[in-house]
């Protein structure tokens, strides 16, 4: 089943943050946004532009495509 884009981004940000042992607060701060804004992206309450996705990806050491790619949950 296809997930909503915000759910895909959330799952990928959480996965890569965990791999880098970074809290979501640290990811947000390093990306230049508040934790509240990051959580709004996850909820689908804020639609980030590709530049912001790129900033978050850079902090996590991945590409914007990595954050936008839907991964098989199984």
Image (cartoon, rainbow, N blue to C red):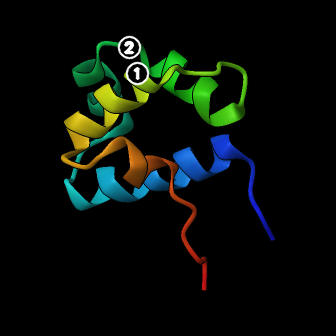
Does residue 14 sit above or below 64 in this rendering? below
Image side of residue 61 versus residue 41, left or right: left
How many labels, in total? Answer: 2
Q: CA distance from mark 2 to mark 1?
A: 9 Å
Image side of residue 13 versus residue 63, left or right: right
65 or 19, which is in the foreground? 65
Point out residue 31 in the picture as x, y percentages from the top left corner: 28, 22
Point out residue 41 in the picture as x, y percentages from the top left corner: 60, 28
Quarter residue 40 falls in: top right
Mark sitting earlier along the chain (2/1): 2
Does residue 74 sit above or below 6 in this rendering? below
Q: Tell me, yes or no, whether the two marked residues, 2 and 1, touch with CB atoms within 8 Å.
A: yes
* Residue at the image position 22 percent from the left and 23 percent from the top: 30
Q: Tell me if residue 13 can be seen.
A: no
Of the 4 image quadrants, the one containing the N terminus is bottom right
Q: Which residue is mark 1?
A: 52
Point out residue 10 in the picture as x, y percentages from the top left corner: 54, 46
Q: Which residue is mark 2?
A: 33
Of the 4 image quadrants, the one containing the C terminus is bottom right
Point out residue 24 in the picture as x, y percentages from the top left corner: 38, 36
20 or 52, which is in the foreground? 52
54 or 19, which is in the foreground? 54
Task: Select label 2 or label 1 by which is in front.
Answer: 1
Image side of residue 70 versus residue 53, left or right: right
Helix, strand or loop status at disc 2: loop
Helix, strand or loop status at disc 1: helix
* Residue at the image position 32 percent from the left and 55 percent from the top: 16
Q: Tell me if residue 2 can be seen.
A: yes
Image side of residue 40 versus residue 21, left or right: right
* Residue at the image position 77 percent from the left and 63 percent from the top: 2
* Residue at the image position 41 percent from the left and 49 percent from the top: 65
Quarter residue 54 falls in: top left
């Amino acid at each position: 089943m296809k997930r909503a884009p915000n759910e895909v981004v959330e799952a990928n940000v959480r996965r890569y943050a965990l791999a880098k042992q970074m809290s979501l607060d640290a990811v947000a701060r390093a990306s230049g946004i508040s934790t509240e804004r990051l959580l709004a992206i996850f909820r689908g309450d804020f639609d980030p532009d590709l530049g912001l996705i790129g900033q978050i990806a850079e902090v996590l050491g991945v590409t914007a495509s990595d954050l936008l790619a839907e991964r098989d949950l199984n």
